[in-house]
C-alpha cells in the first residue's frame, strides 16, 4: 500500500472547512501566549488550506480541458503553461502522466525534455493511477530534479481514465510564504512533518528533509518522543528542550499542534516558541565610512587567506578543531571561520555547535537565497564573494546583511568568512518577494513563447512594454554573461558583463548564471536604482530560458514602503 501524504504542520488551529480541506482545533488555550498562537494560526491555516484549494482548482480546470486538446502535443503543453501562469509563484512545474506512467506533456517549456519518460516505477505515480482521485503525494525525489510534492488531479474522457495532471512544488518554499510573515512579526517558529516523521518545513531550514523519529540530530533530545505524540494525537500542546532559533544553546520550548485534512490527506499544523527569553538590548550601530568598510573587508579577506594556508599546512582535522574553538586563535572580533565539505556538510561553525555534522544543502536565508548551493558553486570555480542575511553573534544573533567570501582548501572542502554590513538594509517583505517571483515567471513565460516574435528585438520590446524601465524592469543575459536586455541601460545590451563586480567585489552576473543553471534562484547585488539614481542593495530572482539564457528582475529593500 502506497502511503499518502500525511503532513504534520506544528501549530495550534481552527474550526473551519475550506473546499476540500478541514481543520481540527486544539483544546482552548490557557496562557496569553497560547491564545495568541492559536489566533494567529487559525488565520494562517485557513490561508494554507485556501492556497491548496486554489491549486487544485487550477488542476481540475486543466483536467477538464485536456480531453479536448489531447493529453500530448503542443496544445496539451499550452494548457499546462496557462495553468502555471495563474497559480502560486512557488509552483515549479506541471506534467501530464498517462495511465501507464508515461509523461505526455510538461511545462514550463524547458521541462519538455521529460516528455516520453516512463515514471511508472515511482510508487507515487502508481498510487495516483490506481486511485484515480485528487491527491497530494508524499514528498519524494521528483524526476524534475528536486525533492517535492505532486498535487494531482485525474483526467477522464467520459468514463475512460486517461491519466492525471499535476502541479509540483517544494513544500518548504510553498509554505514559507504563509509562515514567514508571522515569524517576522512574532518570533514564533513552525514545523511541518509527515506521519513517518519526515520534516517538510522548519523555520530553521537545515532541519528540512530530516526524519524527526530517527535522525541523529534528535536522538539525544526529546524530539522523537514528542514527534510520535504529535503523530498519534490530532491536537495538543507540549514542552520540550532543543536548540534555540540561532543554534547557540539549548532552551525550553512550547509547541501547539492541530490537524488539517486536504483531499483525504491529513496535515498537522502548529507553532513553536522559546519559553526562556535570552535576548539583550539592541546594540547601538554606528555606520562606517566607505574607507572603514573597505578596510574591514580587506581584513576579512586576509583573515580567510591565513585560515586556508593553515588548513593546507595542518590538515582538515587539526584545522577544524582550531576553527571550532570560540576562544581560539581564529576568532578576531566579529571575524570567524566556517567550513563545509562539497556536499554541504557542516565542518566548522564556532558559534553554532548544533549544526556541526549536519547537511545544510537545502537551507536558504530569510529572503530565499540558497546559501550552501551558492557557496559550493563559488568554491568550485576557485572562490568568490556574495551577500546573504545571517544571525550576527556580535549583535545578539540579529539577522543582518553579510558579505561572505568563500575559498576552497582543496577539491573536497572550503572555508568562508564574512563582514556584517548593517548599512545595507536586508528587509524585504513577503509581498514584495511574491511580486518579484511572479514578475520573473511571467517574463520567463513570454520568453519561452518567443517563437511568437519574429526576432529578439520584438521579444524584449514586448517584455519592456509590459514591465517598464523603472525598478520593476526585467533583465536578460546569456549563459556566457552577455547582456541581452536591460531597458534602463540600453548601452549595456550586447556587452560581455561576465566579470562585472559591484562596489564590494561581488560578481553578480556569475552568481546569476549559477542560479539559473540550478533551475532558478535569488542573487543579491549592489546596483543603481533607476527610480532614485542611487546605488543600493538589490535582491534579484532569475529563471532559465531553456539552457541558453536567463531572465531576472529585482527589488530594492531601501525602496520598499
Image (cartoon, helix red, strand yellow):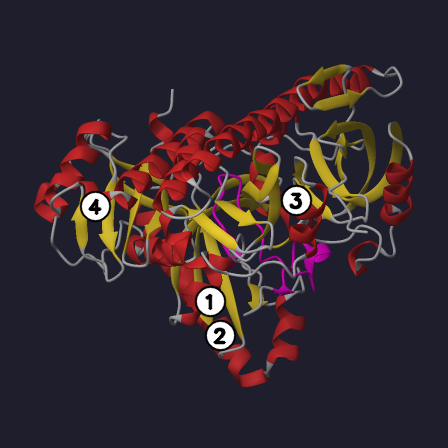
Q: Earlier in the sequence, mark 1 or mark 3?
A: 3
SS majority, magenta? loop
Give the alpha-carbon distance from disc 1 to disc 3, as whole Å.
27 Å
Mark 2 in CB contact with mark 4 (< 8 angstroms): no
Q: Nearer the viewer, residue 404 or 491?
A: 491
- Numbered badge on residue 204: 3
Label 2 crowding class (10 Å Cα cut-off): few <14, some 14-19, many 20+? Answer: many
Label 3 crowding class (10 Å Cα cut-off): few <14, some 14-19, many 20+? Answer: some
- Label 2: which residue? 308
Q: Nearer the viewer, residue 435 or 535?
A: 435
What's the residue at 41%, 38% (across, down)?
Answer: 69
Give the alpha-carbon distance from disc 1 to disc 2, as whole Å.
6 Å
The residue positioned farthest toward the left in the image shown: 491
Q: Earlier in the sequence, mark 2 or mark 4?
A: 2
- Nearer the observer: mark 4 or 3; the answer is 4
- Nearer the observer: mark 4 or 1; the answer is 4
Q: Earlier in the sequence, mark 4 or mark 1?
A: 1
Mark 2 in CB contact with mark 3 (< 8 angstroms): no
Q: Residue 190: horizontal and vertical position, in percent?
A: 70, 34
- Nearer the observer: mark 1 or 3; the answer is 3
- Residue stretch rendered in magenta on the structure: 345-372
Mark 4 in CB contact with mark 3 (< 8 angstroms): no
Give the alpha-carbon distance from disc 4 to disc 1, as whole Å.
49 Å
Amino acid at each position: 500500500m502506497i502511503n499518502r501524504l500525511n503532513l504534520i504542520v506544528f501549530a495550534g488551529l481552527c474550526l473551519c472547512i475550506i473546499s476540500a480541506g478541514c481543520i481540527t482545533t486544539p483544546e482552548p488555550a490557557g496562557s496569553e501566549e497560547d491564545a495568541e498562537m492559536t489566533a494567529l494560526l487559525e488565520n494562517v491555516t485557513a490561508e494554507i488550506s485556501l492556497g491548496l484549494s486554489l491549486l487544485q482548482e487550477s488542476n481540475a480546470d486543466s483536467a477538464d480541458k485536456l480531453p479536448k486538446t489531447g493529453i500530448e502535443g503542443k496544445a496539451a503543453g499550452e494548457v499546462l503553461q496557462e495553468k502555471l501562469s495563474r497559480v502560486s509563484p512557488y509552483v515549479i512545474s506541471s506534467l501530464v502522466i498517462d495511465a501507464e506512467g508515461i509523461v505526455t506533456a510538461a511545462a514550463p517549456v524547458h521541462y519538455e525534455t521529460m516528455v516520453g519518460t516512463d515514471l511508472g516505477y515511482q510508487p507515487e505515480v502508481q498510487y495516483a493511477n490506481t486511485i484515480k482521485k485528487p491527491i497530494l503525494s508524499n514528498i519524494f525525489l521528483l524526476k524534475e530534479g528536486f525533492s517535492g510534492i505532486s498535487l494531482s488531479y485525474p483526467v477522464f474522457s467520459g468514463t475512460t481514465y486517461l491519466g492525471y495532471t499535476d502541479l509540483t512544488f517544494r513544500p518548504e518554499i510553498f509554505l514559507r510564504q504563509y509562515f514567514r510573515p508571522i515569524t517576522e512579526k512574532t518570533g514564533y517558529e513552525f514545523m511541518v512533518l509527515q506521519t513517518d516523521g519526515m520534516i517538510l518545513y522548519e523555520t530553521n531550514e537545515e532541519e528540512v528533509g530530516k526524519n524527526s523519529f530517527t535522525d541523529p540530530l534528535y536522538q539525544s533530545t526529546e524530539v522523537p518522543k514528542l514527534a510520535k505524540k504529535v503523530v498519534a494525537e490530532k491536537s495538543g500542546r507540549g514542552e520540550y528542550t532543543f536548540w534555540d532559533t540561532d543554534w547557540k544553546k539549548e532552551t525550553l520550548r512550547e509547541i501547539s499542534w492541530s490537524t488539517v485534512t486536504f483531499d483525504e490527506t491529513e496535515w498537522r499544523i502548529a507553532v513553536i516558541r522559546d519559553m526562556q527569553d535570552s535576548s539583550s538590548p539592541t546594540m547601538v550601530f554606528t555606520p562606517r565610512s566607505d574607507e572603514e568598510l573597505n578596510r574591514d573587508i580587506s581584513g576579512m579577506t586576509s583573515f580567510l587567506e591565513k585560515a586556508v594556508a593553515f588548513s593546507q599546512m595542518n590538515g582538515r582535522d587539526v584545522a577544524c578543531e582550531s576553527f571550532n574553538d570560540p576562544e581560539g586563535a581564529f576568532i578576531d572580533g566579529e571575524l570567524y571561520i566556517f567550513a563545509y565539505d562539497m556536499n554541504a556538510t557542516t565542518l566548522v561553525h564556532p558559534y553554532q555547535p548544533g549544526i556541526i555534522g549536519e547537511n545544510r544543502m537545502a537551507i536558504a536565508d530569510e529572503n530565499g537565497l540558497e546559501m550552501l548551493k551558492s557557496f559550493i558553486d563559488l568554491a568550485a570555480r576557485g572562490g568568490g564573494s556574495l551577500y546573504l542575511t545571517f544571525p550576527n553573534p556580535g549583535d545578539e544573533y540579529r539577522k543582518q546583511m553579510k558579505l561572505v567570501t568563500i575559498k576552497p582548501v582543496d577539491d573536497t572542502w572550503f572555508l568562508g568568512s564574512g563582514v556584517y554590513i548593517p548599512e545595507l538594509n536586508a528587509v524585504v517583505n513577503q509581498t514584495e518577494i511574491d511580486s518579484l517571483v511572479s514578475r520573473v515567471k511571467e517574463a520567463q513565460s513570454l520568453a519561452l513563447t518567443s517563437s511568437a516574435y519574429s526576432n529578439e528585438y520584438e521579444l524584449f520590446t514586448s517584455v519592456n512594454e509590459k514591465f517598464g524601465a523603472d525598478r520593476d524592469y526585467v533583465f536578460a543575459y546569456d549563459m556566457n554573461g552577455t547582456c541581452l536586455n536591460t531597458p534602463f541601460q540600453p548601452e549595456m545590451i550586447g556587452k560581455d558583463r561576465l566579470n562585472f563586480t559591484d562596489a564590494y567585489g561581488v560578481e553578480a552576473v556569475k552568481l546569476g548564471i549559477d542560479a539559473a543553471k540550478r533551475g532558478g534562484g535569488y542573487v543579491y547585488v549592489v546596483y543603481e536604482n533607476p527610480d532614485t539614481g542611487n546605488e543600493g542593495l538589490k535582491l534579484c530572482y532569475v529563471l532559465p530560458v531553456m539552457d541558453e539564457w536567463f531572465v531576472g528582475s529585482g527589488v530594492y529593500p531601501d525602496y520598499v514602503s
